């Protein structure tokens, strides 16, 4: 697999079976930043499918967005804003959509920055803004039925 290098950042919305990029790939990608010499921290996050939600057993999760191109664009804008706000060397994000099962990765983020506190803050902001600001729908299939969770859930 060849990832995007140099000035272009890696921010992708991907159908689950179209391409496999792991959290290790993202960490390696941010380490290739031309600003890595200025970095003292890399933080990463891998959001996975939880197998239980309260007293319900999750059998599968379907994650979708009504407009992939729009969501991709909004994700890129969000990442650029966070990168500038916290003066990060690099941020890489993969958000999968499709059908998932317990333990499957859904959302991957790696952030490289000069100091640990602002790098951690940047990571948290990417996670929270992606969850609350982008138009995703989760159809959570459980042993007690299907729960539909809109953005922010």
Image (spheres, grey):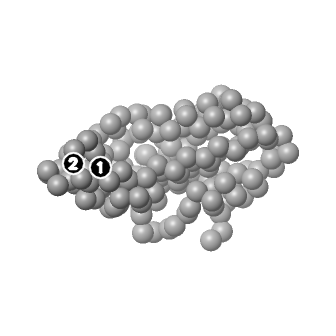
Q: Residue 94: percent from the left, percent from the top?
A: 52, 53
Q: Residue furthest front?
A: 55
Q: Residue at x 69, y 56 (%)?
A: 29
Q: Residue 23: percent from the left, percent from the top?
A: 58, 57
Answer above or below: position of 10 versus 37.
below
**On-image quarter of the C terminus:** top left
Residue 128 visible in the current orientation: yes
Compare residues 107 and 67 and report the one nearer the observer: 107
Instruction: Judge left or right: residue 95 versus residue 149.
Output: right
Q: Residues within 10 Å of mark 1 (few under 14, many from 20)?
A: few
Instruction: Judge left or right: residue 8 versus residue 52.
Output: right
In the structure shown, which secondary structural element does the residue marked by tag 1 occupy? strand
> Is the residue under label 1 in contact with that under label 2 (CB below 8 Å)?
yes
Which residue position is annotated with label 1?
52
Q: CA distance from mark 2 to mark 1?
A: 6 Å
Instruction: Judge left or right: residue 2 versus residue 73.
Output: right
Compare residues 22 and 77 and report the one nearer the observer: 22
Q: Residue at x 77, y 36 (%)?
A: 114
In the structure shown, which secondary structural element does the residue marked by tag 2 occupy? strand
Answer above or below: position of 143 versus 80.
below
Q: Residue furthest right?
A: 37
Q: Residue 145: percent from the left, percent from the top?
A: 14, 51
Residue 148, image quadrant = top left
Dot label at residue 56? 2
Answer above or below: position of 20 versus 51.
below
**On-image quarter of the N terminus:** bottom right
Q: Residues within 10 Å of mark 2 (few under 14, many from 20)?
A: few
Residue 8 visible in the current orientation: no
Residue 118, image quadrant = top right
Q: Residue 82: percent from the left, percent from the top?
A: 61, 33
């Amino acid at each position: 697999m060849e990832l995007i290098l140099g000035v272009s950042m890696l921010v992708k919305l991907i159908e689950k079976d179209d391409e496999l990029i792991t959290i290790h790939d993202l960490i390696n990608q941010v380490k290739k930043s031309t600003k890595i010499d200025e970095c003292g921290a890399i933080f990463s996050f891998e959001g996975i499918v939880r197998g239980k939600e309260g007293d319900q057993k999750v059998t599968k999760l379907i994650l979708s967005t009504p407009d992939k191109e729009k969501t991709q664009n909004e994700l890129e804008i969000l990442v650029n804003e966070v990168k500038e706000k916290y003066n990060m060397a690099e941020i890489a994000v993969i958000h999968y959509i499709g059908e998932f099962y317990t333990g499957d990765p859904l959302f991957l983020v790696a952030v490289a920055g000069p100091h640990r506190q602002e790098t951690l803050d940047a990571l948290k902001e990417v996670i929270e803004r992606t969850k609350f600001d982008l138009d995703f729908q989760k159809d959570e299939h459980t042993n007690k039925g299907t729960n539909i969770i809109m953005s922010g859930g």
